[in-house]
Image (cartoon, helix red, strand yellow):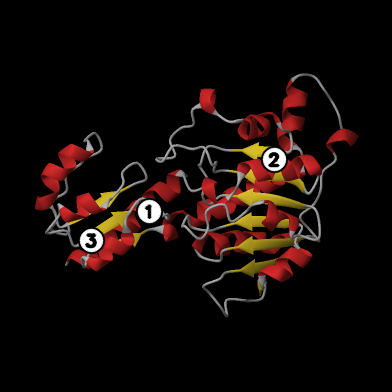
């Protein structure tokens, strides 16, 4: 309002209701629950900008929107700190058996040797995708005295004092830990599959805080069972709903049932970028970007 715009809330409205109203709007802001498809874009002759409060843009037909001259903006700067911290937290929890040890102590079980952990120090971490999230994770690893390799198909010359720009082959040859920071596209769907995992010389730990469908869950389970994958940290799941709000536990396939029971896997409900601070930062950033596009 202070910037001179009138805003309406459509949180509880259906797609049909939006189609009736959207011709009146110059801009629209969405989260993950709503998809902006061709039919919606064709019903919006005045639309100039679409804002996505978050990082992923897979629920917007970005290519078609841009063909119609509609700007598409998002706010990965707003939750990158949260994602970086969460990834580190999950990794420490996995390597040091914190979930199991905490549960045991609460039940009067005192096992020390059995819960001996592993250090990040001295290991090599491979980061796949070096945008806002990948670089945030790398930044937070600086103090752990580990070697960090990063690969990004679409970026070059990003290496610095603590990150070595690497090829995929260099990551295959050296990594102990692999963290996925890719957007979900046709190119990256199931990017982490059995072939990818078996390409590593060492047995590895896998972290995925990106999108669930970047990783083939069935292949992950197979490689955990074989010992190739020593453990996994998954904030995102292949079987999430489109809006990331739930999974139907009664309909989960066998690979997911395995993950639910495995002590080698840490699971969280797509909350890596979902802190109180990031909620404010994302909202502020997307508002600033929308205002700049619409003025």
Mark 2 crowdedness (10 Å alpha carbons): few <14, some 14-19, many ≥20: many
Tell me the number on the disc at residue 282: 1
Disc 1 versus disc 2: nearer the observer: 2
Q: Position of residue 245 (x, y in %)?
A: 43, 35
Mark 1 crowdedness (10 Å alpha carbons): few <14, some 14-19, many ≥20: many
| Residue at 73%, 22% in the rendered image | 106
| Residue at 24%, 53% in the rendered image | 38
Q: Which residue in the rendered view is the most extreme toward the front?
A: 195
Disc 2 versus disc 3: nearer the observer: 2
Q: Is residue 93 visible?
A: no
Q: Nearer the viewer, residue 268 or 246?
A: 246
Q: Nearer the viewer, residue 74 or 185?
A: 185
Disc 2 on helix, strand or loop? helix
| Residue at 34%, 41% in the rendered image | 33
Say above or below: 43 vs 136. above
Q: Is residue 192 visible?
A: yes
| Residue at 54%, 43% in the rendered image | 236
| Residue 191 placement, left or right of 164 | left
Tell me the number on the disc at residue 49: 3
Q: Which residue in the rendered view is the most extreme toward the bottom?
A: 157
Q: Do labels 2 and 3 touch, CB within 8 Å?
A: no
- Name which of mark 1 and mark 2 comes first in the sequence: 2
| Residue 160 placement, left or right of 56 | right
- From mark 2 to mark 3, how far is it between C-alphas? 42 Å
Q: Which residue is mark 2?
A: 221
Q: Position of residue 43 (x, y in %)?
A: 15, 52
Q: Nearer the viewer, residue 284 or 245?
A: 245
Q: Position of residue 267 (x, y in %)?
A: 61, 37
């Amino acid at each position: 309002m202070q910037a001179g715009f009138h805003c309406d809330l459509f949180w509880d409205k259906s797609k049909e209701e939006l189609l009736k109203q959207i011709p009146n709007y110059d801009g629209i802001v969405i989260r993950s629950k709503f998809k902006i498809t061709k039919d919606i874009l064709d019903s919006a002759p005045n639309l100039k900008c679409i804002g996505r409060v978050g990082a992923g843009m897979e629920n917007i037909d970005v290519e078609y929107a841009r063909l119609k001259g509609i700007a598409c903006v998002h706010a990965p700067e707003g939750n990158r700190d949260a994602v970086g911290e969460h990834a580190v937290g999950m990794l420490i929890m996995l390597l040091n058996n914190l979930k199991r040890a905490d549960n045991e102590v609460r039940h009067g079980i005192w096992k020390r040797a059995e819960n001996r952990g592993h250090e990040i120090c001295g290991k090599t971490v491979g980061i796949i995708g070096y945008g806002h999230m990948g670089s945030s994770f790398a930044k937070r690893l600086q103090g752990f005295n580990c070697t960090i390799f990063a690969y990004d198909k679409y970026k070059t010359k990003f290496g610095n004092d603590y990150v070595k720009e690497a090829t995929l082959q260099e990551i295959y040859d050296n990594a102990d830990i692999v963290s996925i920071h890719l957007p979900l596209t046709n190119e990256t769907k199931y990017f982490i599959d059995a072939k990818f995992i078996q390409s590593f010389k060492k047995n590895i730990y896998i972290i995925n805080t990106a999108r669930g469908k970047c990783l083939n869950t069935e292949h992950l389970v197979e490689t955990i069972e074989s010992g190739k994958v020593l453990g996994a940290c998954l904030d995102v799941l292949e079987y999430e709903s489109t809006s990331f709000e739930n999974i139907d536990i009664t309909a989960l396939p066998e690979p997911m049932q395995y993950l639910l029971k495995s002590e080698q896997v840490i699971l969280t409900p797509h909350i890596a970028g979902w802190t109180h601070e990031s909620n404010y930062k994302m909202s502020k950033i997307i508002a600033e970007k929308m205002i700049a596009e619409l003025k």
